[in-house]
Structure formats: C-alpha cells, structure tokens
Image: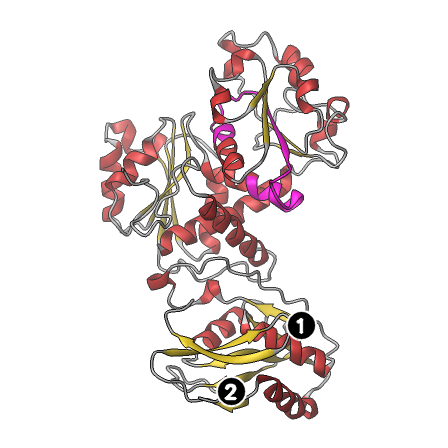
Amino acid sequence: MKLPDAENLCQQLVAELRPRLGPKSAMIGLYTGGAWLAERLHGLLALPTPLGLMDIAFYRDDYHEQGLHHDPKRTKIPFDVNGRELLLVDDVLYTGRTVRAAMNELFDWGRPASITLVVLADRGGRQLPICAQYCGAKVDVPEGMRLRLKRAADGKLALALEPKSAA
Amino acid sequence: MQRNPQLNAAGELQHLLSIEGLPPAILTQILDTAESFVGVTEREVKKVPLLRGKSVFNLFFEPSTRTRTTFEIAAKRLSADVINLNIAVSSQTKGESLLDTVANLSAMQADIFVVRHNSSGAPFLIARHVKPHEHVVNAGDGRHAHPTQGLLDLYTIRHYKKDFSRLTVAIVGDVLHSRVARSLIHGLTTLGAPEVRVIGPQTLLPIGVEALGVKVFHDMREGLRDCDVVVMLRLQSERMKGALLPSAQEYFKHYGLTLDKLSLARPDAIVMHPGPMNRGVEIDSSVADGPHSVILPQVTFGIAVRMAVMSIVAGN
C-alpha cells in the first residue's frame, strides 16, 4: 500500500496555513510525531512566537486501564496561552481522544481565543466529535495496523504502517 | 523465588515501600515522571486530573509536618480527595490494631494509603493486607526507610549534577537513626553513583554500614574532600540524652558543616538537608543560606516526586 509522502504533505499544509496566520497565532505540537511535524511547520512558517510542545500523558482518558505512560515528556509552552489563536498540531488523527486530552490540558494553561487542529493524516475511526480544519491527507489503514510518523536521522519525515502491538 | 512485595505480577510498581530492591528502571521512571510534574507545578492551574475520584488517606502514626503536607499537596494536585488522619490521637489510643484501622478505612473506599509509622515494616504489613486496587506508599517507617525522601534527594542530585556515574556523595551525621540515609544510599548505589561516603562519629554509624557499599569516615574534613554532593542529616536532640554524644557544641565543632569545611568539597558542590534543620548543630547558617545550598528546591521537588509516585502506583 502506497502512503502519501510526508514531506509533500508538509509543504501543502504550509501553503494552506500561511495566509491564515495573524499576530496572535502560535503553534503547539503533540509528542512525539506531532512535535516533529510542528517543529517543521513552525520553521517553514517562520512563526515569531516560540513553539510549544505538549505531552498529554497526565490527561489521557485510559489512565485507569493503562496506567501512567512511561517516560512522559515535560509540556513546555513558552508563551501566554490567553487570547492566542492556537494551531494544535498532531501527526495522525484517529479516535480524537488525544486531541480531547490536549484541549483539556490547554485550558489549564489559559483561555486561548481559538484552537485550530492541524494533522498530517486522518485515518478515520473517530470516537469523539472532533475534526481537523487542516489535514494533509486521508489514509485508509488496514485492520490491526497503526499509522505513525517517523523521523530519519537527517530529519526527513515519513509515514509508516506497523502492526498495532508494536510500541 | 518470592516476589518483591512492591511490584505486581507484571513487574510494575504497586506499592512504594522501600528503594531497596527496586530495579534502576523503576527509579528512573519515577524521576523522569517527576520532571514532567515539575512543569505542572509551574503553571497557572497546578492540577492534573489523573486521580480524580480517588481517595488518598494520609495515615500518620508519628508526627510530621513537612512530609504530610507535601503528600497532601501532591495528592490534591493530582485531583484526589485527601483525608488526613492523625492516628496518634485517634482509635489506636483506644486500642484498635493497625490492620483493623486499615480495614475500616478500606471500607470507606480508600485508593492510596500514605503511611508513616514508628515501627519499621508497618507499611509492608499493611501492603500485604490491602485489596488489589489499593496502594501503599511508605512515608517513613521507624529507622528503616523513607523512600520518597530518598527519591527527592536523587531527583535533586540529578537536577543539579545531570547523572550519577561520576559523583562522589557524602552523607554526614546521624546515619544510625536515619531512614533518609538508608533510602538514599540504596538509591545512589542502584543508579550507579561510584562513591558514597558516610561521615560521622562511630556512635552514630550503624555497625557494618560498609556492607551497603559505602566508605566510612570519622574525620569530616577527610570525608568531604572533593565531594560533589554533601547531604547533612538532622541530629535528633533526643540522641543527646542517650550518651551517644557529649554536647551539641561539641558535635558542631566536629561534624557541623561550615563554609570552612565545605571549601574542601568541589567548588560546585551542592548541600542538601532533609529538614527540619538544626542551625548551629549540624549546619551553619552561612552554609544553609549560602549559594551551595539546595535545601529549599528539595522541598519543591518533593511535591513533584510524590505526585509521580502516587500516579504511577495508582495506575498499575
């Protein structure tokens, strides 16, 4: 199965986002894949506000079944969230639970003016009423597989399919 | 082989009873998680929803202000409901047994018991009798262990010194009566600190302490030489009466940390103390309030470390 080229999708997202940026725009990427994508988009768009990075481990709704994720990263939002037009960036949109958790965490940082969801790929399978305003591509993922973003040593981004059991 | 009573069948942390016997990976997991919680404590809303709907019972059979308060703050920042029980003035004085007390609290839907007890091993006894979804965190048992203090000491050392592999750490004072010292020694050796020293008069060092993997010094100046980390222990005034020491003044002269003695350690050495401090007994004010002191950051890190421990055990 042929997956779309992640680098091309980045360029496409940059072209779509650029005309929509304003003085209050700021970007936050979700660990791990979303953070890579956000680093790339943030650089290409030359946003003046520093990039925020978020780990939603403390807000996951499966904590009581799965326990706390090992090695959570520290959420770092180096700007005041209040009144910002936020671009929330993740690599793959699936059930929508990660985005819900991220929004819950964001509101503990302040009250943004708006949140816009930007994803590289949408694989369907939503369990919550969440959709991305900016989406690189829709991708069909076979049963039992997961779609992930990978980053090579040279920083090149690529989408990959792998069995669900793999961490 | 008997399973470690702190770990579940999958090898995950079920209770935190002692640092001794925990694999390095679990200690590192706790320290890494605590680092993320330090970020939470710097935000506008210093709370996360992990333990929403859970009840944390602080069972303090022995007085404590700092440890009980920091456990309470940690549990509240995890959104748990916190119930403080000062057992010294409750049912135990009416003759109720420890396990009966715990069984009654369990019937009130407890999820985590934070236990401080003057008998070594009391939290282990409780952990053996709680239900599978209940978790026990040792907040200090007798002379045995004080694992969250040990972990916050480890966190503080890692925060300032980055890694353990080249460190010389000196623990100074009343090691004999110190559960803090024991927990820290186990943590440091587990995480690979190459040289841990204990410094104190013979009467305040446990017999055979070398077996824990430490070097023993009775001369403080000799022991402090080239140390990266100096951990001062509280001299418990009640020990004076037991003829273990001549006087506080005499103790300060030999084992009190002054700027002069500290100058023998490395120039970038940090000074720690688990509190409460006796100024002029084990530590001089010029050191306690000086640039090497990280005593107050220890308290702040302690909250994040306790958040990490409670959220890890409650999720397993």
Residue in the image at 48% along x and 29% along y: B182
In x, y percent, where is residue B274? 56, 33
In x, y percent, where is residue A57? 47, 64
Relative side of B65 to B283, left or right = left
Q: Chain of mark 2?
A: A
Where is mark 1, residue-wise?
A: A51
The question of residue B21 being in magenta is answered with no
Query: Height in image: B304 above or below B91?
Result: below
The question of residue B174 being in magenta is answered with yes
User: Quarter of the image containing the C terminus of chain B?
Assistant: bottom left
Q: How is the image coloured?
A: secondary structure
Q: Nearer the viewer, residue B193 or B294?
A: B193
Where is mark 2, residue-wise?
A: A132
Q: Could you say which disc has been placed on residue A85 in the image?
A: none
Query: On the image, which quarter does residue A124 sit in?
Result: bottom left
Whether the residues at callouts 2 and 1 have beta carbons within 8 Å, the answer is: no
Q: Is residue B176 visible?
A: no
In x, y percent, where is residue A79? 68, 69
Q: Which residues are magenta?
A: B154-182
Q: Nearer the viewer, residue A62 or B116?
A: A62
Q: Amino acid at mark 2?
A: Ala
